[in-house]
Image (spheres, rainbow, N blue to C red):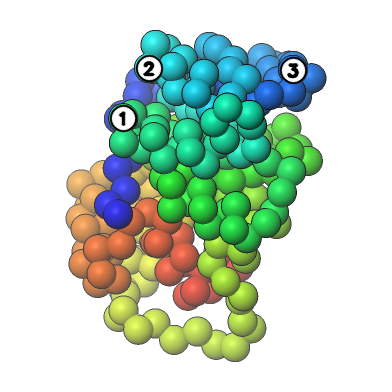
């Protein structure tokens, strides 16, 4: 599939978040965390995937933070439908499971990230911000599940990437927006965009999740 990034949002307003979890206590805890951050705004809560889809259509949040295991409609089914009907909304899966099938399944369904419920508040906020800005985010515990077993052996680059392209690829994998990459590398936003296009051509026009894997395979995220 070809990944579609969320529509550009105004950086002057908070990131709008819709929560979906069938446990009220969990929602209360997450909401309490997020309400402490001025850059985030919880705009609604759902108790299952079907309700999350309905609220997403009505509220148009930037991010849907959703449990993978829910009644009526689970997070996997909801993410699949979201990709078809509301691809501009970033789906971030929240789960207690690091099951490989769950992780691969939600990525294939169109989710932009997968985090575990025992992560810190700071990491949760980082994950939300990353996917809201068009990136991907996976808890460190599930990263190996997504990309396969890693190796300590030297990694050869079969794509012939330049040093600058490798820098840009690393930034893509970390979910950094073009403006931030341009500022860090001291180049223009247009040049960053050009490098992104060159990258996709060299590695086979892969989507963002696959580019994350490429970066891992090349040892750029170690």
Quadrant where the C terminus sits is: bottom right
Residue that mark 1 sits on: 85
Judge from the rendering whether residue 157 lies leftward or rightward of residue 49; answer left or right.
left
Q: Residues within 10 Å of mark 2 (few under 14, many from 20)?
A: few
Where is 157 relative to 35, above or below? below
Quadrant where the N terminus sits is: bottom left
Q: CA distance from mark 1 to mark 2?
A: 9 Å
Query: Which of these two is toward me, 186 or 106?
Result: 106
Q: Residues within 10 Å of mark 3 (few under 14, many from 20)?
A: few
**Mark 1 and mark 2 residues within 8 Å of each other at the beta carbon:** yes
Q: Secondary structure at mark 3?
A: helix
Q: Residue 36 location, x and y as percent?
A: 69, 16
Q: CA distance from mark 3 to mark 2?
A: 22 Å
Q: Secondary structure at mark 1?
A: helix
Residue that mark 2 sits on: 57
Identity of the residue drawn at 33% across and 66% down? 165
Q: CA distance from mark 3 to mark 1?
A: 27 Å
Identity of the residue drawn at 40% across and 22% down? 11
Nearest to N terminus: mark 1 or mark 2: 2
Q: Residue 14 location, x and y as percent?
A: 49, 17
Residue that mark 3 sits on: 24
């Amino acid at each position: 599939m070809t990944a579609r990034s969320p529509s550009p949002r105004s950086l002057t307003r908070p990131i709008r978040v819709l929560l979906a979890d069938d446990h009220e206590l969990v929602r209360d805890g997450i909401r309490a965390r997020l309400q402490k951050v001025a850059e985030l705004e919880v705009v609604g809560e759902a108790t299952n995937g079907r309700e999350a889809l309905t609220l997403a259509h009505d509220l148009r949040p930037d991010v849907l933070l959703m449990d993978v295991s829910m009644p009526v409609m689970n997070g996997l089914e909801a993410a699949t439908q979201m990709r078809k009907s509301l691809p501009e909304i970033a789906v971030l899966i929240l789960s207690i499971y690091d099951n490989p099938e769950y992780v691969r399944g939600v990525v294939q369904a169109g989710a932009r990230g997968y985090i575990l419920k025992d992560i810190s508040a700071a990491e949760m906020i980082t994950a939300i911000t990353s996917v809201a800005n068009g990136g991907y985010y996976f808890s460190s515990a599930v990263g190996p599940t997504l990309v396969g077993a890693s190796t300590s052996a030297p990694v050869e680059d079969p794509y012939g990437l330049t040093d600058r392209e490798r820098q840009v690829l690393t930034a893509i994998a970390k979910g950094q927006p073009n403006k931030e990459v341009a500022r860090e590398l001291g180049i223009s936003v247009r040049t960053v965009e050009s490098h992104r296009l060159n990258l996709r051509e060299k590695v086979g026009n892969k989507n963002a999740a696959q580019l994350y894997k490429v970066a891992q395979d090349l040892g750029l995220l170690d």
